[in-house]
Image: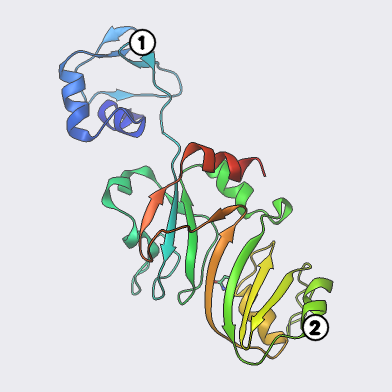
């Protein structure tokens, strides 16, 4: 059961104060009867709520892209450390957003959030093989043998087998790495297994989504067509 005013906000009817005015103006019906009391409890599974005669679908799907700075852990809460949730604007606080996968505390770059559990699971499932592109600064210089080892699928120090990945040397101590899975510290461990310890890591792309000109530390909601790109890869 949801409060009617919260349901209206979550459905995208407006902000809390707009929803108050909408209710007062008698524009909302519950199961065909006008309802002005925002505190009334409703069951979105079994009851029909309309605004100006249009049926509302309940929680609006929200997908957000953050350009994560270093120093924040990917978690919804943490007793001691700053979390990525603190970087999201307050207007999304009631949207139940969860990070899609994780970036290490010191890793920067593209991190998605959504309130759509199905989309979240599809994006982090290794079966879906969403390619993620990372820029790394690292010790040493990547050479042809390293490129071939990444392409063949690396075995990490603890015996973990990685899927084939793409290593593109960019210059001394700089590479792009594309992986289709998200094991713990994956890129750092892959590079370390080739004696190229990572000193800086940034995720630049997920599927066909890039950070564009989104400044570090800022977040924005994805457009419907961008969500479509993620879903129909
Ligand atoms: N691989 C890593 O090692 N760290 C990240 O944050 C992401 C991928």
Q: Earlier in the sequence, mark 2 or mark 1?
A: 1
Q: Is residue 64 above or below residue 71?
A: above
Display coloring: rainbow
Residue 21 position within the rendered picture, expressed as x and y whole percent measured from the top left? 16, 23
Quadrant showing the C terminus:
top right
Residue 146 position within the rendered picture, expressed as x and y whole percent measured from the top left? 77, 83
Q: Is residue 201 above or below residue 121?
A: below
Residue ID for mark 2: 144
Quadrant showing the N terminus:
top left
Callout in the foreground (2, 1): 2
Question: Of helix, strand and loop, which one carries label 2?
Answer: helix
Disc marking residue 187: none
Rounded to the nearest angstrom, the CA distance separating label 2 from label 1 is 67 Å
Q: Going by the image, does 172 lie left or right of 152?
A: left
Residue 32 position within the rendered picture, expressed as x and y whole percent measured from the top left? 34, 7
Quadrant observed for ligand 1 in the rendered image: bottom right
**Residue at horizontal 37 percent and vertical 43 percent from the top:** 95
Residue 101 position within the rendered picture, expressed as x and y whole percent measured from the top left? 55, 59
**Residue at horizontal 38 percent and vertical 66 percent from the top:** 216
CB within 8 Å, label 2 to label 1: no
Residue ID for mark 1: 31
Give the quarter of the image for residue 185.
bottom right
């Amino acid at each position: 059961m949801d409060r009617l005013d919260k349901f209206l906000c979550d459905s995208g009817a407006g902000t809390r104060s707009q929803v108050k005015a909408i209710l007062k103006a008698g524009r909302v019906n519950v199961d065909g009867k006008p309802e002005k009391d925002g505190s009334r409890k409703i069951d979105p599974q079994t009851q029909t709520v309309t605004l100006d005669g249009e049926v509302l679908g309940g929680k609006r799907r929200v997908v957000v892209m953050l350009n994560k700075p270093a120093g924040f852990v990917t978690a919804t809460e943490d007793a001691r450390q700053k979390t990525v949730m603190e970087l999201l604007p307050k207007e999304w606080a009631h949207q139940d957003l969860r990070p899609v996968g994780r970036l290490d505390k010191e890793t920067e770059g593209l991190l998605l959030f959504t309130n759509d559990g199905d989309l979240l699971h599809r994006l982090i499932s290794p079966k879906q093989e969403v390619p993620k592109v990372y820029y790394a600064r690292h010790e040493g210089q990547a050479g042809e043998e390293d490129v071939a080892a990444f392409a063949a699928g690396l075995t990490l120090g603890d015996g973990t087998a990685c899927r084939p990945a793409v290593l593109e040397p960019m210059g001394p101590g700089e590479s792009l790495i594309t992986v289709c899975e998200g094991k713990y510290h994956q890129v750092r461990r892959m590079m370390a297994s080739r004696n190229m310890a990572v000193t800086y890591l940034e995720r630049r792309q997920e599927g066909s989504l890039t950070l564009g000109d989104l400044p570090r530390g800022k977040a924005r909601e994805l457009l419907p067509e961008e969500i479509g790109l993620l879903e129909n890869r």
